[in-house]
Image (tube, rainbow, N blue to C red):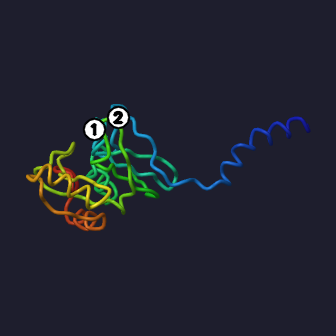
Amino acid sequence: MKRRTLIKSLLGLPLGLGLLQPTLAAPRPLRVGVDACPYCNMTLLDARYAAQMVTSTGRVYHYDDVGCLLDHLLGYGGPKATPREVYVADFAASERQAARFLPAQQAYFLYHERIRTPMGTGLLAFASPGALEAYLREKPQHAGEQLRWNNLLARGRQRAWVPGYGR
């Protein structure tokens, strides 16, 4: 009897210690060509446009477009989820196969309908205003609205970001 109790307590020890440690807020790895967007069901093929949500239960959702994340957060579709962490890929620092995520609240967004994104939202995220301006010097035809995260959410409450989705 004591042997069985000892084995149970030893097996439960790693789990118990894991629950006591606080989880670190950091983006999770993205698998390009494998992960699928929970909002539009498309496979993520270009990490530069990606976004990520970590739910309060620890589940990770990867999005192929920032607009899919916004629409999911605003309740236009996708599985029910309560966000704990929200990240977007820095367009300037990311590559097609590897995203460099930053917290959505810290990002600077560029919106223009001529910017081609996986779901046609025309949204790009940048880590700084300087990176956004450098992109616009390179692509002046994409000069559009410069927005912050709260602006995107407010606009999304009026209409869905992803064309053809939403209410």
User: Which residue does the image show at 37% across and 36% down from the upper left?
Assistant: 35
User: Which residue does the image show at 79% across and 40% down from the upper left?
Assistant: 10
Q: Are marks 1 and 2 in contact (CB under 8 Å)?
A: yes
Residue 75 is situated, as x and y percent measured from the top left of the image, at 32, 58
Residue 94 is situated, as x and y percent measured from the top left of the image, at 32, 43
Residue 61 is situated, as x and y percent measured from the top left of the image, at 40, 46
- N-term mark: 1 or 2: 2
Residue 8's disc is none
Furthest-left residue in view?
A: 141
User: Label 2 crowding class (10 Å Cα cut-off): few <14, some 14-19, many 20+?
Assistant: some
User: Which residue does the image show at 23% across and 55% down from the upper left?
Assistant: 166
- In the image, taking residue 136 as reference, residue 60 lies left or right, namely right
Q: Is residue 25 above or below residue 60?
A: below
- In the image, taking residue 152 as reference, residue 58 lies left or right, namely right
Query: Exactly how many numbered labels are in the figure?
Result: 2
- In the image, taking residue 155 as reference, residue 60 lies left or right, namely right
Residue 46's disc is 1
Mark 1 falls on what kind of element? loop
User: Which residue does the image show at 61% across and 56% down from the upper left?
Assistant: 22
Q: CA distance from mark 1 to mark 2?
A: 7 Å
Amino acid at circle 1: Asp
Mark 2 falls on what kind of element? loop
Q: Is residue 42 above or below residue 154?
A: above
Q: Which residue is mark 2?
A: 32
On the question of residue 167 being in view, the answer is: no
Quadrant (top left/top right/bottom left/bottom right) for the N terminus: top right
Which of the 4 image quarters holds residue 48?
Answer: top left
- In the image, taking residue 159 as reference, residue 51 lies left or right, namely right
Furthest-top residue in view?
A: 33
User: Label 1 crowding class (10 Å Cα cut-off): few <14, some 14-19, many 20+?
Assistant: some
Residue 164 is situated, as x and y percent measured from the top left of the image, at 16, 49
